[in-house]
Image (cartoon, grey):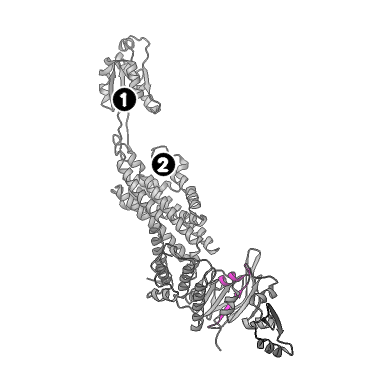
Amino acid sequence: MVEPAIEVSDLAFSYGTTRAVDGVSFSAEPGEIIGLLGPNGAGKSTTIKMLTGQLPPDRGSIRILGKNMPADREAIQSRMGVCFEEKNLYGAMSGVENLRFFGKLFGIKDLDTDHLLERVGLPDRGGDRVSTYSKGMRQRLMMARVLLNKPDVLFLDEPTDGLDPVSSRAVRALISQEAERGATVVLTTHDMMEADVLSNRVAFINEGKILALDTPESFKLKYGRRSVRIRSRNGEHVDETIVELDDKDASERIREAVAAADLLTIHTEEATLEDVFVEFAGRGLQ
Amino acid sequence: MSGRAAIIGSIVAKDLREFTRDRFYVVITVVGLAFYILIFWVLPDTVDETIELGIVQTGMGEFFEQTAEQGLTITPFETEEQLRNAIVEGEDRISVGLSFPDRFVEQVASGMPTTVTVYVTGDVPPEIRNTLSAIVTELGFLASGQAPLVTQPAEAEVVLGVDRAGDQISLRERMRPLFAFFVLVIEMMALATLVASEIQTRTVTAVLATPARVSDFLAAKGIAGTLLAFAQAVLLMAAIQSFGNRPGTLLLALLLGSVMVTGLGLIAGSAGRDFLSIVFWSMLFLIPLMIPAIATMFPGTAAAWVKAIPSWPLVDIIVQATTFDAAFGELSGQFAALAGWCVVAFVGGWWVLKRKVVAL
């Protein structure tokens, strides 16, 4: 039996009297992408901070790659990559200098910065100061920094926040490649579509607790509406028909609609992850 | 190099690289150093102790011959009006004058009352005015051919340390501790800016997500700050020829001073959010710490409380080693005090920054 890459049990942390994380438990297998979804202040970032050794938990246990956090912090961190929500790079240094500096902190002597910059789509800007980079370029460099020690576990906090669609797609491709390589990824995001596309499983967090943890598909099936919306042209009007898939004559009605000459669109009416979250938390994501 | 040392070395190298790319601090450091060195060499290296005295009553000239050799230059004037004008205009650097009445000698010799007018400008210190009064009295006795009413006691003068009579401490030498202090303070602000930047941009969080420990980060900041301050203080002191016979003593003092301002820089950097707040926090330390350096510009004026200021031992060591050629053994008390303040400042800075970093 393969040991989970991440195993979290009954994790809790308070800022003064405010309980930020309250009994969070989950595990992740090697190569799995876990999405943590929740509104601002839900406890996602605090959970990540404890997992990455930035905060000592008030209660609970964290095992990452068979070692205990924070007791074995350095051993875990040497095999870990973290992408922060803030673009915390050294602006006065070039992209290459940033990567080399962090490479030295990991004890890497022969860091191939060209390869890393190539992977994140910055092959020609490595020599430029980071202060001259756009937001998207900084985010790509952040991803290069995450990858420089070939981590077995990646913690990514809003990795595509504020990026244009091209940059977002590039970052998502990198995350998928890392998971295919066998790395475990913990991803926090506000972007439901991103969580849906990338995550093997998603956890809905609110008020410091995991409300539900399952695959996106299961959530959508469980909390969505099993129906098909069909739109067809009728003279100068557009007719819309909703067919409930659980109805006995559902197949017949769909066949009739498809056979119609002026068919415009057919859409399934499955739930989005945001719908699921509203179901759990009683409010939309902010 | 061990893992820890390699990590600390990498952070120090990164900090120094960032410093060299901060245009403001590079310019202010280079211009500051050049300016202090220039000012030092432009300032006079001797003190003119001669008093330029104007007198009215040419017949008194012979009485001043002996006194003139002791630091008085006499300029005779025909009338009291000419003397007043000369003093007011600063003509021939004359700032004091004596106007003897006609028949002064005869009147004094015959016991008749007479008045000698002493003219001084407003900036003449009281001791010079008193000296002039004493000169007038002495002249009275001299003119009358009588001895003073009391027998003058014999004097036995014992000079402790280097006798600087006739070789007074020049303004240039008095400014030396102040220049050194300015350099240290500028580097304190540079370090504070580096620290504040790490906190505000959260780069420290990224550093601490690697195998680097908080103690590595703090040690690196301490080393980088000390290196910056020490290197520039040594450069300045070398350029103004301060090492003389006591290079080891001065180097040790500058090193301890650099550690002290580094500790304060860590505090200012932890408290500061931007350039203005860093300047505010730095000024909070700078103003009281500068008092001893200013006090040394006026020898003998340092009050007891000034000696309780943490920068006093540093300033005193610089003065004693460079001006009075004091050896390490003679300055052991000042070194002990300076080392104590170093520990207080550095441990305080370490503690404050650690709290700030851990709380991010």
Q: In which quarter of the image is the N terminus of chain A?
A: bottom right
Confirm whether the magenta stretch covers residue B310. no
Q: Distance between the residues labelled 2 and 1?
A: 31 Å
On residue B294, the disc is 2
Question: Which class describes the residues within 10 Å of circle 2: few (<14), some (14-19), or many (20+)?
Answer: some
Labels 2 and 1: the sequence-earlier one? 1
Check the image and report above or below for B26 versus A5. above
Does dot 1 land on a helix, a strand or a loop? helix
Residue A278 at x, y = what percent?
Answer: 68, 73
In this rendering, which labeled residue sits more in front, label 2 or label 1?
A: 1
Check the image and report above or below for A18 versus A7. above
Q: In the picture provided, is B140 more to the left or to the right than A88?
A: left
Label 1 sits on residue = B91
Residue A54 at x, y = what percent?
Answer: 54, 69
Where residue B175 sits, quadrant-wise, is top left
Q: Is residue A65 visible?
A: yes
Confirm whether the magenta stretch covers residue A45. yes
Residue drawn at x 71%, y 88% is A253
Chain letter behind tag 2: B
Query: What segment carries the magenta color?
Result: A31-49
CB of mark 2 within 8 Å of CB of mark 1? no
Outermost residue on the right side: it is A248
